[in-house]
Image (cartoon, rainbow, N blue to C red):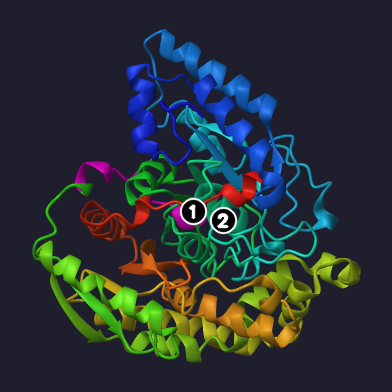
Amino acid sequence: MSDAAPPFATLAAIARQLASGEVSSTELTESYLRRIEAMDDKLNAFRMVTGDRAMDAAAAADKLRARGQTLGPLHGIPYAAKDLYDVAGLPTSAGAKVLETNIAERNCRTVDDLQAAGMVLLGKTNTVQFAYGGVGVNHDHGTPHNPWSETLHAPGGSSSGSGVAVASGMAPMALGTDTGGSVRIPSALCGISGLKTTVGRVSRAGVYPLSWSLDSVGPLARSVEDTAMVYEAITGEDPVDTSTLGQTRQRVLRELDGDIRGMRVAFAETAFWEGANTEVVEKVRAVANTFEILGAEVSSVNFSPAGDALALNPGGLIIAAEAYTLNRALVDNQFDELDPAISNRVIKGKDVMAADYLSNIRAWEQLRNEARAAMRDVDVLLCPATMAPAHPVAEIDADPDTYSHYNLQYLRNTSIGNILNLCGLSVPCGFTSKGLPVGLMIYAKSFDEVTALRAGHAYQQATDWHLHTPDLDWVDD
């Protein structure tokens, strides 16, 4: 890739280069496609690459720019989308071989929004089957390789391929989904930034569902500013997804650079920390100094709704119930063709009683009210994004019990935010002694993405963890 468009450039930097004429969208897209061709055999981030489509879209973007027109700051910039997003004429396999002939008739709303913003789709990224897992393992299409280790380590799930694509510089941004942590876990384990939006903020229409109660859409990118650029382009009302009714397009970029002096930043005690890896705890606790220097009011609060949320979600049975309902035909008729790590969890939803399901949904609503009350005097909460860094896949996938153990470790802190419908960011905040990324979680109240983004952007302006990139010499060997 030319010096004018380095593979680890942020969306904001690429936008400036395109605007100045330093690089064209065609050159940029061709460079990313060459990088994917050279690296993805080992990294396995992509389920499919849409090279011809991408080059055509890039040429169209350049032609429009040559006439003095652009469709916004994202115009002409390449990206990737998780293989849950419908793209007209392409299969949406949701990580399952049995869905490889599931050809989309039209684009999902988010892909349409990014197309309207002038972005160029490079291809679709691998995902955990049905997006149902925090480790990132896929036994059908192969597990994407976390680029921070030559030995196969967990990329995080379920947006595993999206995390690896961005972290390895094969795409500057990739779309993910987040039902229990699927944007934030791969962001944390792969050392990038990821935004979990509030359910109801961004349309999910045309995105393969896991849980209608908890599914959300969000970007994985190199910086918080980048996630904000994408967030602006994809928010707003969509009549097809009634959860978004009444929503307006959010304009947050102009508020990112504001002073965070006086922002009330609190470490959320205590459920988020119990049993967490000591190095993870050390790195996350250390961010207090940075926020204090930035002028924020740093404290700790007893955030009891977190522990209550965990108690109300034993084994993720509510998600299992919804996942089974959505995938009932596949599970009932093609069970043996599915990934057992996933199908054995989905089928548990078949036995969830309606009374238990409805009781838990009602309890979640009460918990969300309690969370709002607990955050009345707090702007953002801080905690580890994951309880542990990436572990070797061979160790995780040794047997069902070890898989379950690590899956719960990765999902624990993120799933709390889904149950409480908080918005949240994962941002890099350091590395373990083995050189593996550690993620900081920044939670804000429902529909208050701008505050989470302001806090995360301020932190990244004062630190350089998000600028670190993996040594990929082993990929080129």
Viewer can see residue 451: yes
Residue 365 falls within the magenta-colored stretch: no
Element type where label 2 sits in the image: loop
Please say if 316 is above or below 252: below
Q: Which secondary structure dominates the residues rendered in magenta?
A: loop
Element type where label 1 sits in the image: loop
Q: Is residue 277 left or right of residue 476?
A: left
Residue with the mark numbered 1 = 470
Residue type, mark 1 in image: Pro
Nearer-the-camera pick, 334 or 476: 476
Q: CA distance from mark 1 to mark 2?
A: 6 Å
Q: State the image quarter where residue 112 is shown.
A: top right
Q: Which residues are magenta?
A: 240-255
Badge 1 vs badge 2, beta-carbon distance below 8 Å: yes
Q: Residue at x 44, y 43 (%)?
A: 234
Residue with the mark numbered 2 = 147
Measured as percent of width and height from the top left, residue 423 is found at 37, 64
For mark 1, does the 10 Å Cα neighbourhood hold few (<14), some (14 to 19), or many (20 or more) residues? some
